[in-house]
């Protein structure tokens, strides 16, 4: 990509140059090349965006739902037609492989498809004659202006956990992409621009935490859908609540998987390695702690070590590459110092992916797959989100000990079990304290028609993204009790 200009915002149906003059560089994490500049928009711009989204709301909510979803059908077609171009942009600015970028877009499109079910999914319910001649109905109405604050690791998919549902149910929407990966949404907004939506229905404002702050405090914005790290999710949850907004805030993760001795060795190794090292470990559903039970220790130590060493790392546009770089140089340094911290607290290095050498890695933020073993429960790394291609291995004597260890953690995004025993699987499903559970699955990412169910410090709020929860989050329930004189005595 050669467009090294300052990206515009998009609101009121137009591309708008940000007024602040402040900007950040966006660089390709695989080679350090400058891709573009992202504007750090001002509070004033957020005000303009929020006001135009508010203005658009009154007409948009009156647009029949059957008509509103027609725009989404068209958006799906445009996303399909432009899939390759968007996928390349994701790879260029986010670093994941082209296969992962295509997969991410498929997930985004799936959410558009599910949101097209709004005519059925936003229905209310009713009872006739709750007393003689009196009826009661519950109607779902849109909440107003919905804002989305997104993280860097899924620049296309995560805004789509929210935006299609928000507009299908009659809200207008503002997206603030991550300032580290702003180009993907700009390309998607080129498609949104072709939809001929009424002005102000879908808007985008670029910027950093100051733009997020202005969104959280703006009186014309009614709901916040946030995804990012746990410390920020906590801030967002509190600030949005303080300003009277409905809020759903997804946070970070430290996802454990248990490997039992009866797990299929070959399949489990492949799946666990993909979970730990896919997207360079920068998935909120990445396995980062493998707990072996009994004899599984020896089997998986060797198999995972071999697999991690064989992964082809490089620039993700090369179709043969299996893992790309991490997002920034700072991220790379943070990951490397966390590996040091793990070893200085007693862990041993089974596979060391630090400082890879060779022309393919020059200028990029590469850390190759890394495995730490003999991790003890008191090692701080057991509880720290690394968000890089690092798998820590530890051992438990029994499945009960392993589940106890999992449940003692602060996060609850995902927990997985690898086994061929139905009884162990049932126990795990029943007892593990996480919102997304995988049984012989390494990335238990719910389909768009199920909620993305983080628990504990991985989620703050009540209603999650996707699925029926999304239709509930973006609508308010109104209950009407009605009586019409004469109707209880008249015969028709
Ligand atoms: P981040 O928290 O640094 O940033 C997320 C968004 O919040 C960005 O748009 C950023 O501009 C904004 N922001 C930053 N500081 C803020 C502040 N003080 N107030 C308000 N807004 C602020 O997260 P990231 O590094 O972009 O993304 C990685 C994190 O996201 C990881 O922790 C990962 O686990 C998590 N994540 C979670 C899920 C999930 O579903 N639970 C999904 C994807 C990523």
Image (cartoon, helix red, strand yellow):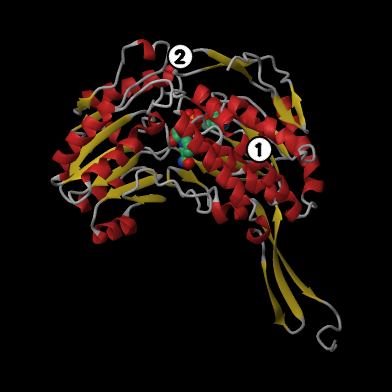
* Quadrant location of the N terminus in the rendered image: top right
265 with respect to 222 (left or right) = left
- Whether residue 407 is visible: no
Which is nearer the eye, 407 or 174? 174
Percent coordinates x, y for residue 255 in the rendering: 35, 41
Badge 2 or badge 1: first in the primary sequence = 2
Q: Residues within 10 Å of mark 1 (few under 14, many from 20)?
A: some
Task: Residue 108: name its quadrant.
Answer: top right
Q: Nearer the viewer, mark 2 or mark 1?
A: 1
Secondary structure type for disc 2: loop
166 with respect to 457 (left or right) = right
Task: Residue 269: name its quadrant.
Answer: top left
Residue visible at 66% across and 38% down in the picture: 78
Q: Residues within 10 Å of mark 2 (few under 14, many from 20)?
A: some
- Asked if 480 appears above or below 97 in the picture, the reply is below
Q: Which residue is mark 2?
A: 31
Do the CB atoms of the residues marked 2 and 1 lie less than 8 Å apart?
no
């Amino acid at each position: 990509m050669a467009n090294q200009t300052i990206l515009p915002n998009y609101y009121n149906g137009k591309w708008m140059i940000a007024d602040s003059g402040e900007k950040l560089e966006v660089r390709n994490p695989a080679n350090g090349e400058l891709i573009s500049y992202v504007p750090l928009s001002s509070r004033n711009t957020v005000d303009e965006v929020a006001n135009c989204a508010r203005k658009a709301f009154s007409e948009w909510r009156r647009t029949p739902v059957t008509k509103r979803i027609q725009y989404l059908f068209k958006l799906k077609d445009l996303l399909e037609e432009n899939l390759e171009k968007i996928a390349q942009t994701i790879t260029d600015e986010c670093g994941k492989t082209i296969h992962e970028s295509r997969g991410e877009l498929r997930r985004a499109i799936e959410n558009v498809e599910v949101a097209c079910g709004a005519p059925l999914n936003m229905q209310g319910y009713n009872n006739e004659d709750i007393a003689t001649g009196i009826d009661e109905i519950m109607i779902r109405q849109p909440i107003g202006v919905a804002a989305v604050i997104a993280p860097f690791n899924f620049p296309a998919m995560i805004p789509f956990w929210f935006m299609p549902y928000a507009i299908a149910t009659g809200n207008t929407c503002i997206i603030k992409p991550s300032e580290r990966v702003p180009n993907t949404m700009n390309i998607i907004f080129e498609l949104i621009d072709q939809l001929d939506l009424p002005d102000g229905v879908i808007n985008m404002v670029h910027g950093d935490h100051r733009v997020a702050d202005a969104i959280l405090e703006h009186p014309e914005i009614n709901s916040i859908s946030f995804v990012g790290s746990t410390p920020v999710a906590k801030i967002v949850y509190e600030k949005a609540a303080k300003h009277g907004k409905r809020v759903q805030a997804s946070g970070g993760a430290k996802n454990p998987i248990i490997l039992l001795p009866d797990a299929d060795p070959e399949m489990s190794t492949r799946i666990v390695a993909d979970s730990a090292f896919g997207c360079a470990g920068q998935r909120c559903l990445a396995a980062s702690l493998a707990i072996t039970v009994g004899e599984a220790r020896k089997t998986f130590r060797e198999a995972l070590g071999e697999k991690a060493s064989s992964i082809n790392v490089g620039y993700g546009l090369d179709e043969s590459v299996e893992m790309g770089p991490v997002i920034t140089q700072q991220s790379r340094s943070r990951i490397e110092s966390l590996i040091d911290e793990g070893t200085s607290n007693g862990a041993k290095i089974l596979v060391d992916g630090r400082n890879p050498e060779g022309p393919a890695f020059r200028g990029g933020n590469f850390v190759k797959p890394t495995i730490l073993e003999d991790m003890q429960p008191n090692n701080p790394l057991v509880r720290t989100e690394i968000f890089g291609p690092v798998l820590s291995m530890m051992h438990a004597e029994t499945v009960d000990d392993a589940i106890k260890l999992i449940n003692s953690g602060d996060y609850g995004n995902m927990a997985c079990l690898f086994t061929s025993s139905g009884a162990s699987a049932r126990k795990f499903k029943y007892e593990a304290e996480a919102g997304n559970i995988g049984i012989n699955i390494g990335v238990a990412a719910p389909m768009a028609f199920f909620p993305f169910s983080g628990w504990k410090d991985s989620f703050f709020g009540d209603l999650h993204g996707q699925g029926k929860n999304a239709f509930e989050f973006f609508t308010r329930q109104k209950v009407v009790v009605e009586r019409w004189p004469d109707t209880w005595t008249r015969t028709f």
